[in-house]
Amino acid sequence: AKLRIAIVGRPNVGKSTLFNRLVGKKLALVDDTPGVTRDRREGDGHLGDLNFTVFDTAGFEDAVDDSIEGRMRRQTERAIKEADVALFLIDARAGITPLDMEFARLLRKSATPIVLCANKAEGREGTMGAHGAWELGLGEPVALSAEHGEGMLDLFETIIDRL
Ligand code: GDP
Ligand code: MG
């Protein structure tokens, strides 16, 4: 069966932008409004000679009730469970937020291998910001720019490593 990759993380870190880059099409809606991708989308993508199906998920909000946030959280948990590897995105420019830390706590317990990705890492500001992701306890962050297509070789090599 084809490798399954889930993209997870709080709203606005660039999940849909990375999804679009990996599938090479604009299948997911990219928006400045946090949490705009409420439904799950999937598409076929590749990095080098690695072929996979990738899932874009909504973000994860701090809520456990039946709100939109609660549903987004459950959807994310399901996506991780179904995936062979999950890409956990943070925003290198915004720095680590409490929601990122909560997400990291959940992901550290997950049986699915996690690749921590510091997105929006283009430029000097981004490179410095990416370093802060070490504190999440998920190993070395892969510095990415989904928007500019930077870090894709590192991402490929790290995914291969974790499998
Ligand atoms: P999602 O909510 O996690 O799916 O995030 P989106 O993909 O919708 O992106 C949220 C915002 O971040 C949009 O304005 C994107 O253009 C922007 N963005 C995504 N990737 C990058 C990146 O690599 N660098 C920068 N500077 N902005 C990015
Ligand atoms: Mg999205």
Image (tube, rainbow, N blue to C red):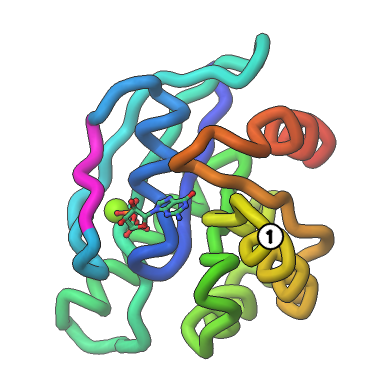
Q: In this view, does 52 lie to the left or right of 134?
A: left
Q: In the rendered image, which quarter contains the C terminus? A: top right
Q: Is 147 part of what is drawn in magenta? A: no
Decide: is 141 above or below 25: below
Instruction: Kindly indicate the quadrant of the structure image that contains residue 75.
Output: bottom left
Residue closer to the observer: 89 or 79: 89
Specify the farthest residue to the top. 49
Residue located beneath label 1 in the image: 124
Which residue is drawn at the image coordinates 48% and 44% (left, top)?
6
Q: Quick check: 34 left or right of 50?
A: left
The amino acid type found where label 1 is placed reads Arg
Q: Is most of the magenta stretch helix, strand or loop?
A: loop
Residue 29 on the magenta segment: yes
x and y percent of residue 160 in the render?
77, 30
Within the image, what quadrant is residue 90 found in? bottom right
Q: Which residue lies furthest to the front in this view?
A: 124
Q: Is mark 1 within 8 Å of ligand 1?
A: no
Name which residue lies at 61% across and 20% down.
47
Horizontal and vertical percent for residue 103?
A: 53, 75
Residue drawn at (24%, 78%), measured in percent from left and top?
69
Q: Residue at x 68, y 60 (%)?
A: 124
Disc 1 crowd rating (10 Å Cα; few below 14, some 14-19, many 20+) is: few
Q: Where is residue 143 in the image (x, y as percent from the top left)?
A: 69, 51
Give percent across and percent down for residue 56. Answer: 36, 44
**Horizontally, is 44 left or right of 130 in the view?**
left
Q: Is residue 100 above or below residue 16?
A: below
The stretch in magenta equals: 27-31
Drawn side of residue 44 relative to residue 65, left or right? right
Q: What element carries label 1?
A: helix
Q: Which corner quadrant holds the N terminus?
A: top right
